[in-house]
Amino acid sequence: MVSWRPPTLILLYALSQWILYANAVANPDSYPAFDEIWSLRESNLIRQQQKKHALVARQFNGAFEPTDLNGNRIPAYNTRYYFDQLIDHDDPSKGTFKQRFWYTWEFYKPGGPIVLTTPGESNAGLYPSYDLTNSSMSGALAQTLNGAVISIEHRFFGESNPYPDLLSDHLKVHTIAQAIQDLVYFAQNVKLALPGGDTDAIRPHKTPWILIGGSYPGALVSWTMLKQPGVFWAGYSTAGVVQPIADFWQYFEPIRVNMPKNCSADVGRVIDHLDSLIAAGNFTAVSDLQSIFQLTRAGPLSNFLAWMSVALREWRSLTVTTSRMSLFYQFCDSLEVKDDGEIAPEDGWGLDQAIAGWAKFHRESSVLSAINGNQVDSETAAADSDTVDGELSTQEDKAHSDMSWYWMVCNEVGWVQKGPPLDYTGPAIVSRNIEISDTESLCKRRFPGAFTTSTLAERVAATSKTYQGWDGKADRVFVVNGKRDAWLESTLSATHQNIASTDSRPIYLTDGFHCSDLSMASGFFDDSVRDVQDKAFETMKAWVAEFKPQEDAVQVQPIATSSIVPMQSDTPSSSKPSGASRLKVTAVGGFISFIVGFYVLL
């Protein structure tokens, strides 16, 4: 019997691996979901930027107490105000909720414009000082135009909640259409403490209102100007993701194109190698790679593949002022710089060195801390305990914001960041085997009963039809995008769209990253950003000068949304089964082979 122990133990170990894998595929809920863990890190990156900008504003506040142009003391920037906003603009009988906002009239002269901004999908109370001072584009515009500036919190974020929970039934009023109408209703009804602020003198038909935002709020600027024309006189949209896209694999293209070439070459080699193993159904080799990369605890294949993109997603934290010591460049250095300091040529070192360097990065960085015991890193913990502008950021608040944003992703906008389609033959830095169906399943798990009659792709298509995506046009919208922004391909500067810039809607492309131009400090580090900021001031001055007061306010009409139309198929363009599906079949086949082999040995 002794002679049979080695092969028997080997076979039993193999069986345990097959069972573990099959269980992971069949029961993904038993493992930490990549999307859930990653949201902690993504939120942290956003919070780090908010903290940095708010710090500038706090230093400014410490040196000066706000006063108006006549020298009269006015409330501090972080003074909270509340507006009675309609819960449902299509049914006012449902009542109102308290929507928070902050504002200052530090540079205001009667008759000057009102600049309105929203941070969108986050707690606006964490950084009002940044939005209201001239360290930001919104505050700088107010200063240049002798206007007032307001920052309003988006519904279902921070403390501006129509309902005390995020039940699917209550989230029915958490839509783009309702958010647009929030901005309009606010502009037409809010009362402010500035001179004439409780009269019609500040209404949009009497004085120009300028709507400004970046990223999703940037898209909200364009969509609002399109669907409710005549309310806001002008708009400033940076990184405006105007095109909802379900399968947004192009998210990683600006990263691939703009990252160091040796790094993209070697990352591509690793991904091609991994995808080829999956295509061949070689689970043993895939499992070996998981061990090398310390991702054996990632769970099902979809989680493993998504975790392989974590370092690349750090690109979103880069700004024109970012040091090359950022985590993204640490990752590339791990792949491309040997221990003796030798740097790889443009084509990289090759597959073996790339795998070794990637594994080294996982060992030495904090990027995998969330999956190793599901703990956040010390940087995240420090951010979580910070108080910004007197408002404490809590884990409960972050979870609320994450869930609220996921609803928008699942219900209307998509933007699922994954690798290219299976049949894509071009270079890729993220696996082609990450499936949109993984996000579809996540949506159904997080919001039970909400998405049973339509697919994510169908819902996103309806949103695109309603707001017209790349085809939507509105006058007096100043558009800015950054060529190094990962979100570029969903903006009006998408490389495959060739959308023309016009006098009424100028479109500028800087060398910047995501929303670089919103920070006035960025203009001191990047000439292209500074040039666009200067053009924005010139353009807004000209547009404001063209404004003529009207006798009556614009009559606002309900926003008609497009119906969801069933699609014939919600599968990838390739007819080949996905990697997860192929490996599931391989697992079954392997188990059958084991049983047969076991009895033969006995």
Image: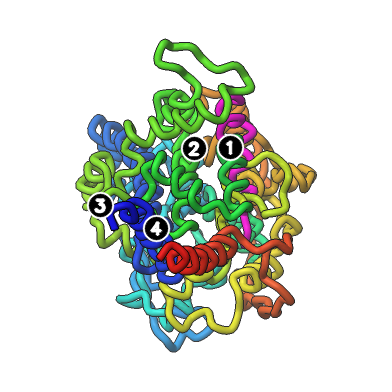
Mark 2 → mark 1, Cα distance in angstroms = 7 Å
The residue where tag 4 is placed is 11
The answer to whether mark 2 and mark 1 are in CB contact below 8 A is: yes
Q: Nearer the viewer, mark 4 or mark 1?
A: 4
Crowd rating for badge 3 (residues with CA inside 10 Å; few <14, some 14–19, many 20+): few
The residue where tag 3 is placed is 373
**Can you tell which mark lies on residue 534?**
none
The answer to whether mark 4 and mark 1 are in CB contact below 8 A is: no
At numbered mark 2, what does the secondary structure look like: helix, strand or loop? helix
Q: Quadrant of the C terminus?
A: bottom left
State how many labels appear.
Answer: 4
Three-letter code for the amino acid on which mark 3 is drawn: Gly
Three-letter code for the amino acid on which mark 4 is drawn: Leu
Q: Which residues are magenta?
A: 246-268
Q: Dominant secondary structure of the magenta stretch? A: helix
The residue where tag 2 is placed is 315
> Quarter of the image holding residue 259?
top right
Three-letter code for the amino acid on which mark 2 is drawn: Trp
Q: Earlier in the sequence, mark 4 or mark 1?
A: 4
Q: Going by the image, does 93 lie left or right of 454?
A: left
At numbered mark 1, what does the secondary structure look like: helix, strand or loop? helix
Q: Nearer the viewer, residue 510 or 38?
A: 38
Crowd rating for badge 1 (residues with CA inside 10 Å; few <14, some 14–19, many 20+): many
Q: Is residue 101 visible?
A: no
Mark 3 → mark 1, Cα distance in angstroms = 29 Å
Residue lying at 23% horizontally and 40% vertically, measured from the top left: 378
Q: Earlier in the sequence, mark 2 or mark 1?
A: 1
Mark 4 → mark 1, Cα distance in angstroms = 43 Å
Mark 3 → mark 2, Cα distance in angstroms = 25 Å
Mark 4 → mark 3, Cα distance in angstroms = 30 Å
The residue where tag 1 is placed is 255
Indicate yes or no whether the magenta region holds residue 435. Answer: no
